[in-house]
Image (cartoon, helix red, strand yellow):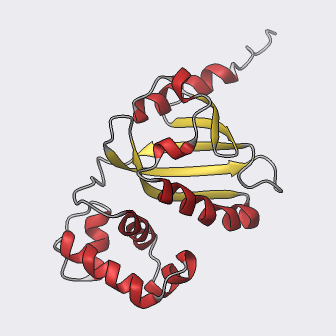
Amino acid sequence: MTAAPAIDYESIFLHAPVGMCISDHRTIQASNDALAQMFGYTRSAMNGMSFQQLYPTMDEFLRTGDRIIPIMNAKGRYSDERIMRRASGELFWCHVTGHAMRATEPLGPGIWTFEDVSEKRPVTAELTPREREIAALLVEGKTSKAIGRQIDLSPRTVEMHRAKLMRKFAAATSSELVHKLVGLQQL
């Protein structure tokens, strides 16, 4: 009887078909080939890089961190779809999932995956950082009231941003807007 070959976890990590990294306090400690290709950096350039460089603006980086903390504290993991920025400056939709390695440190050591969903959901309109944030929450199916509570805005202000998004995406209804945001064709 022969022994099973040892599993090479480092090779699995480096060559996984989805972008992956290990982070600590929102700084990439190690990344794989898929992540480097997705964002347009080399793996060595990404190692030691702050996640801030992957966001369209500093404000979005800070607000996302504030949004992640209570969810990670409650669940130990976080997942959403958001607009990210490649090294070239190109914006794209990305599905992001993270898992805290220490329950007491939501932004401490963690494992994160990134999936480029831009083929299903292209960035077609010029959006402000706040509109990008609200668009991501609308895609999650949240109401204006829930969005307002989550990002500390009045529901009326969220509705004003939703109306601007509807104009930018030429959507007649909120449902049509969400369909356009997720890249589905309205029948």
In this orientation, which residue lies closer to the viewer: 35 or 42?
42
Q: Quadrant of residue 73?
A: bottom right
Above or below 133: residue 144: below
Q: Is residue 123 left or right of residue 36?
A: left
Q: Which residue is found at the position 67% from the left and 39% from the top? A: 23
**Where residue 140 sits in the image (x, y, percent)?**
46, 70
Quadrant that contains the N terminus: top right
**Where residue 74 sits in the image (x, y, percent)?**
74, 67
In this orientation, which residue lies closer to the viewer: 99 or 42?
42
Q: Is residue 170 left or right of residue 114?
A: left
Q: Quadrant of residue 157?
A: bottom left
In this orientation, which residue lies closer to the viewer: 134 or 16?
134
**Where residue 86 sits in the image (x, y, percent)?**
38, 39
Residue 176 appears in the rendering: no
Residue farthest along the bottom direction in this orientation: 156
Q: Which residue is found at the position 41% from the left and 71% from the top? A: 134
Q: Which residue is found at the position 75% from the left and 16% from the top? A: 6
**Where residue 21 sits in the image (x, y, percent)?**
60, 36
Q: Is residue 130 left or right of residue 163?
A: right
In this orientation, which residue lies closer to the viewer: 154 or 185?
154
Above or below 60: residue 11: above
Q: Which residue is found at the position 47% from the left and 29% from the top? A: 36
